[in-house]
Image (cartoon, rainbow, N blue to C red):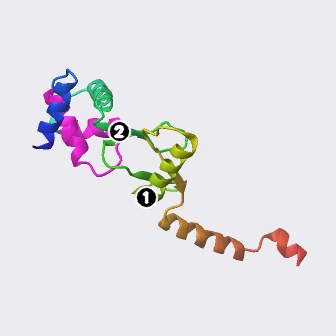
């Protein structure tokens, strides 16, 4: 069964139709490797269908989220940048606070912690969302070099004390 057929079945099971615009947005999301916001999805979809509107993209994303096909993530500290991706196996995100790069990762430790917490507190965990922030290797290196250079600069006030 193809991805489109599987999605069509999900739509039919929830009483919805698989429209050409929904199909197009699913294709865009499936083909896109980046973390993309609604405006980015709209730009890519508009290249293929000049008649699609941003409002249609937002409405379709809402439907795809409700159907469990797409996941919405907020990958910035303020929670204002909404990114969308196809629902997939559990993975987590790291965002560099310097350059904004998003790195996906998997970790059995997070699943283990979730399971242990559920047992310890008699919970039923249905979804785990982990988002780490820090510096990516490139920014970490640049910041390290900048700090090293700054420590070698002697300020006029320091020179007066010497």
User: Could you tell me which residue is drawn at 15 percent across and 32 percent down?
Assistant: 9
Residue 75 visible to the viewer? yes
Up-down relation of residue 152 to residue 99 (above or below): below
Question: Which quadrant would the N terminus be assigned to in this image?
Answer: top left
Image location (x, y in percent) of residue 135: 53, 60
Residue 50 visible to the viewer? no
User: Could you tell me which residue is drawn at 61 percent across and 69 percent down?
Assistant: 146
Residue 142 vs residue 107, the one in the foreground: 107
Residue 5 vs residue 134, the one in the foreground: 5
Residue 29 vs residue 18, the one in the foreground: 18
Foreground mark, 1 or 2, reads 1
Q: Image quarter for residue 53?
A: top left
Q: How many marks?
A: 2
SS label for mark 1: helix
Q: Which residue was labeled with disc 2? A: 71
CA separation in Å, label 1 and label 2: 20 Å
Q: Image quarter for residue 12?
A: top left
Question: Which quadrant would the C terminus be assigned to in this image?
Answer: bottom right
SS label for mark 2: strand
Image location (x, y in percent) of residue 64: 28, 31
Chief SS of the magenta region: helix
- CB contact under 8 Å: marks 1 and 2: no
Identify the mark nearer the N-term, 1 or 2: 2
User: Could you tell me which residue is drawn at 54 percent across and 43 percent down?
Assistant: 77
Q: Say whether residue 52 is magenta.
A: no
Mark 1 neighbour density, 10 Å: few (under 14) some (14–19) many (20 or more): few
Stretch in magenta: 18-47
Image location (x, y in percent) of residue 55: 30, 24
Tell me: 132 left or right of 8. right
Image location (x, y in percent) of residue 104: 39, 55
Up-down relation of residue 19 to residue 93 (above or below): above
Q: Which mark is residue 108?
A: 1
């Amino acid at each position: 069964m193809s991805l489109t057929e599987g999605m069509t079945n999900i739509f039919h099971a929830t009483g919805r139709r698989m429209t050409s615009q929904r199909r197009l947005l699913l294709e865009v999301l499936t083909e896109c490797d980046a973390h993309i916001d609604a405006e980015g999805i709209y730009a890519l979809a508009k290249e293929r269908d000049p008649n699609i509107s941003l409002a249609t993209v937002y409405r379709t994303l809402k439907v795809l989220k409700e159907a469990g096909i797409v996941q919405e993530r907020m990958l910035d500290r303020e929670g204002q940048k909404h990114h969308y991706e196809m629902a997939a196996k559990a993975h987590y995100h790291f965002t560099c606070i310097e350059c904004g790069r998003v790195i996906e990762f998997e970790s059995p430790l997070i699943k283990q912690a979730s399971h242990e917490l559920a047992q310890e507190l008699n919970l039923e965990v249905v979804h785990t969302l982990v988002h780490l922030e820090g510096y990516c290797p490139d920014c970490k290196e640049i910041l390290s070099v900048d700090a090293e250079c700054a420590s070698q600069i002697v300020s006029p006030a320091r020179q007066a004390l010497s």
